Amino acid sequence: MSERSERTGGAAAQPHRREGATGKTLRFRFDGREYAGLEGDTLASALLANGVRAVASSIKLGRPRGVYAAGCEEPNALVQIEEPFPEPMLTATTVELYDGLVATGLPGQGRLADRPDPARYDAVHAHCDVLVVGAGPAGIAAAGVAARAGARVILADERPEPGGSLLGTAETLDGAPGREWAAGEAAALAALPEVRVLRRTTVLGHYDDNYVIAVERRTNHLGAQAPADVARERVWRIRARRVVLATGGHERFVAFAGNDLPGVMLAGAARTYANHYRVLPGSRAVVFTTNDSAYAAALDLAGAGVEIAAIADVRHAPGETWAARCAERGIEVLTGHVVTAAKGEGEVSSVEVAPRPEAQGSGGQAREIPADLLLVSGGWTPVVHLFSQAGGTLRYDEELGAFTPGETRQAVEAAGFARGVGGTGVRTLRECLEDGAEAGRRALAAAGFAVPAETTPPAETTLPTADEEPVAAPAEHVWLVESGDYGTHFVDLQRDVTVAEVLRATGAGLSSVEHVKRYTTAGTAHDQGKTSGLLTGGVVAHALGVDVAELGTTTFRAPYTPVSFAALAGRDRGPLHDPVRVTAMHEWHVARGALFENVGQWKRPWYYPQQGEGPGEDMETAVLRECRAAREDVAAMDASTLGKIDVVGPDAAVLLDRLYTNMMSTLKVGSIRYGVMCRPDGMVFDDGTVIRLADDRFLVTTTTGNAAAVLDWMEEWLQTEWPDLRVHCTSVTEQWATVALVGPRSREVLARLAPGLAVDNDSFPFMTWRDAEVAGIEARVCRISFSGELAYEINVSSWYGLALWEAVMASGEVTPYGTETMHVLRAEKGFPIVGQDTDGTVTPQDLGMEWIVSKKKADFVGKRSFARADTSRPDRKHLVGLLPEDPGVLLPEGAHLVDTSALPEPPVPTLGFVTSSYRSAALGRTFALALVSGGRERIGERLYAPVGADLVPVTVTSHVLYDPEGARRDG
């Protein structure tokens, strides 16, 4: 008789729930229908309790699919959570049931939410002496040994409660059910001051130096009741001295006809549903196995009330103890038999069993056995994903029929079944406990702790069906049941990959399991081949007639299980993902109607349209007005966003000489020098000024968007190539506010603002700096010009930036200008913008700056590359100017250039492209800068720019179009 509940209430509506199941009744909706489950259920166990067999459909073929496993290895039962917040592509086996859950089955793909996620996500860093991954018997034993020796221990497990494999069996330890023993041990560990037990925490990746990433699901199981102030998921970034991987194993299936039908399930999963969730996944079952472990599952299910119609064992001699126990229960054992097909319309209704073709003396004919459940065990595969990610090698274990951990260069231990212990078919509990304890001792010793005397694991480790442990029989490794048609012999259930497709791949000449994976997509779904990876390799080996050990495995990459983008982003979302940076003068710009340009993360004033009685200025009008002010009168720009890096130390000059193409060590205190940085390939990386503040101190300026990259560049060279240099580099961009004062009247304005500063040319020459009080504020004033005009850059503490700006604006008719005007002014002078007039393939020589490449220095980054033939060939693209023959035509930036007045048939060769294009008030026309092949030799030539259907004629000219003599620089 079945133990299905006849009680009233929640369990009564769950016809497949065993008697004795307790817990709060939870209501949920799946595929539009209302159901009830119990607290502690997963969505999968609740659906099975309600008799729901088909949960999803397959992605390519649309075949119905049911629950196949009981954990993260589930290949079939993909669902979309609809309420309280949409989340796609979750496995029903890992979704914890909560009241009000609404979900739907998926055909292998989901849909993203159409509204913002209201939940919070965060991340923390942690350090420990020993990290134990997996809170099964081996993991608990390892953590216990390490913790009681005083080590800092983190025990992380993906399940809501500790126990691992114990949760799915009826095994006992010290007379208590394994589940209770695990809970007690975990509670005792958590009470220790140096121990942290992380539940619902999946370790996703294992990187160099035992850097481990894990994700803790903190409130997913609470649904709408989740506290708003608690992060839904948390990323743990853990650095451990030693790592013990007690990750257990995944059961795999066998390829036979119809092995994807709802009602086909892994034997160990069915055992878990019966014991842990007290759910019967069917009423009459056939068991198909290659090893002893399925016998324990069959006996547990039989004890729970499932009729076991037969056990088809591919072997001729299963363990004698198991056979005897089955005989006692009246279960028929068919040795030397295979399941040739699971049959049924939409779900299993019968199972076809037949002797193996090669079996000698097995007797009997093929027969069809009525059943609604088919339990499959094709063996067990240790979870070696993290070990492999850590750089460990794998070796093939012939007895286990799977790959197990070999050597590793990291401080990593594998324990329990994760390294194949107890791998003869039944994972012997005593062996796992002893191996876990030994792994804990090894980890302690390696971490420098005194190793305690050997501890004995719990003495009474018994199975519920007999007093003695069964004697195991060797497993036999069968990957597929041979057939004339492999069209429904699935090897990857989620990807709908069949044996036929694998044979097609090997028939096409593919012999690498990696190549077959990519040809067929086997192992590329959400489960990453946890149940199908080794099976695919076995089928490939069978097809090629080679040993599985020869083929090896596919690469195990992080993450171990899928992780939400929200968890990875953590608090780095919305404004925190891309913070808006503003200068000290920002509110003034806003109040004056400035429009802004995003430069990196900065909001920079783009231009300042004046508002009159009419509609106000457009950008072209405003920029021409601002340009005239800078060229003919006086104008000011907020230049605070330029990157600023303090370079301090006895070897500061040495570092800068190595990074810049020109000499910086000869710069005198009080002087400034323009410089260019190149990458090792000789291409321009960044440019800016270097200000010498003292013998051992420089202030380096960079482009706005490249500030962080330049600091990172400096640190990379200091930490990896020149760690002997005594230098510290510090970003001070935020600490300084800068006002660029530009134009023929700028000296006059500065003199009024800083009466104590001598501003004449002789006292304050170009490319020098002076400390002074400007508008009563302590300032560093630099004679620098990015416009070609007489100009100053006034730097003050950012606290006083607004006060300085307001003082400048109040000092006379000073016109504020924005970044668009700055670009026009610098382009007229041929000053390049790195990233706009360069594209990563441009050298200083290409920009016409041969003068900035020192011939005196023995070396600098990129110097060797300038000797390459490629960097000196005459047809390299040079920066030149372009004048459209129609002075009113504005070329689009990015437009290509050709030398023919009519386009030939494609492909059309291009000579280069426009990098900058503007309308100039000073020139009274439009102009452009461009990178043109052999450009300097083409000055005076006519080229053409295809713009829409037209070819616009342009004349190549020097890239310096305004004041080429530099006469305006000194006023």
Image (cartoon, rainbow, N blue to C red):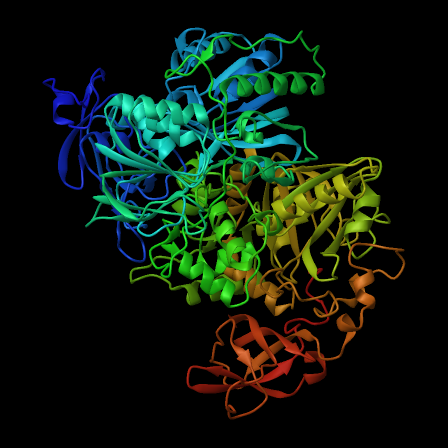
Horizontal relation, residue 287 to residue 386: left or right = left
Horizontal relation, residue 763 to residue 622: left or right = right
Residue at 54% across, 44% down: 557
Horizontal relation, residue 91 to residue 642: left or right = left
The correct choice, above or below, for 378 with respect to 411 in the image is below
Image location (x, y in percent) of residue 828: 60, 69
Q: Is residue 84 visible?
A: no
Residue at 55% across, 55% down: 514
Residue at 66% across, 47% down: 710
Q: Nearer the viewer, residue 711 or 586?
A: 711
Image location (x, y in percent) of residue 852: 78, 61
Q: Which quarter of the rendering shows the N terminus?
A: top left
Residue at 21% across, 32% down: 283
Which of the 4 image quarters holds residue 212? top right
The correct choice, above or below, for 394 with respect to 148 in the image is below
Which of the 4 image quarters holds residue 754? top right
User: How many marks overall?
Assistant: 0
Q: Which quarter of the rendering shows the C terminus?
A: bottom right
Q: Nearer the viewer, residue 571 or 738?
A: 571
Image location (x, y in percent) of residue 759: 71, 49
Q: Nearer the viewer, residue 328 or 274?
A: 328
Q: Is residue 576 visible?
A: yes
Image location (x, y in percent) of residue 37: 20, 26
Q: Nearer the viewer, residue 331 or 785?
A: 331
